[in-house]
Image: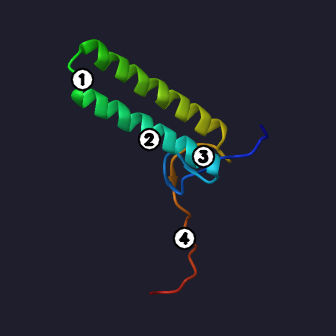
């Protein structure tokens, strides 16, 4: 595996946006895990199943964030977009 970045910091807000197929696959797999866990949760009636699903969601989130941070081209932080340049024009 190379040192290729899969994500870039978001222009607005906190976090990163996928930019390569690897980033999109990771995001899709994470979303699928969450969707399956929620679907099972809605039909399960056992507290132990609910606890297991919660653990799966937490583990998937930790992996997603860890890989995203490591594979982002730049640092994560709050971004408020690009500052507008003052050109002196009135609109």
Q: Point out the tag, 4 or 3, that comes first from the N-terminus.
A: 3
Q: Nearer the viewer, residue 59 or 74?
A: 59
Q: Which mark is residue 84?
A: 4
**Badges 1 and 3: C-beta atoms under 8 Å apart?**
no
Residue 63 picture location, percent across and down: 55, 29
Q: Residue sitting at 55 percent across and 83 percent down? A: 88
Q: Residue sitting at 39 percent across and 35 percent down? A: 34
Q: CA–CA distance between discs 1 and 3?
A: 31 Å
| Disc 1, SS | loop
Residue 22 picture location, percent across and down: 63, 46
Q: Which mark is residue 18?
A: none
Q: CA–CA distance between discs 4 and 3?
A: 30 Å
- Select label 4 or label 1 by which is in front: 1
Residue wearing tag 2 = 31
Q: Which mark is residue 23?
A: 3
| Disc 2, SS | helix
Extreme top residue here? 48
Q: Which mark is residue 44?
A: 1
Label 4 crowding class (10 Å Cα cut-off): few <14, some 14-19, many 20+? few
Q: Residue sitting at 62 percent across and 54 percent down? A: 19
Q: Quadrant of residue 41?
A: top left
Q: Taking 41 as reference, is 4 above or below it?
A: below
Q: CA–CA distance between discs 3 and 2?
A: 12 Å
Q: Point out the tag, 1 or 2, that comes first from the N-terminus.
A: 2
**Badges 3 and 2: C-beta atoms under 8 Å apart?**
no
Residue 39 picture location, percent across and down: 29, 34
């Amino acid at each position: 595996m190379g040192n290729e970045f899969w994500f870039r910091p978001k222009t607005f807000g906190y976090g990163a946006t996928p930019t390569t197929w690897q980033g999109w696959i990771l995001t899709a797999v994470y979303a699928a895990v969450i969707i399956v866990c929620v679907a099972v949760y809605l039909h399960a009636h056992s507290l132990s199943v609910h606890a297991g699903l919660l653990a799966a969601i937490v583990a998937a989130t930790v992996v997603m964030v860890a890989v995203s941070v490591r594979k982002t081209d730049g640092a994560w932080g709050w971004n408020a977009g690009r500052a507008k340049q003052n050109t002196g024009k009135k609109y």
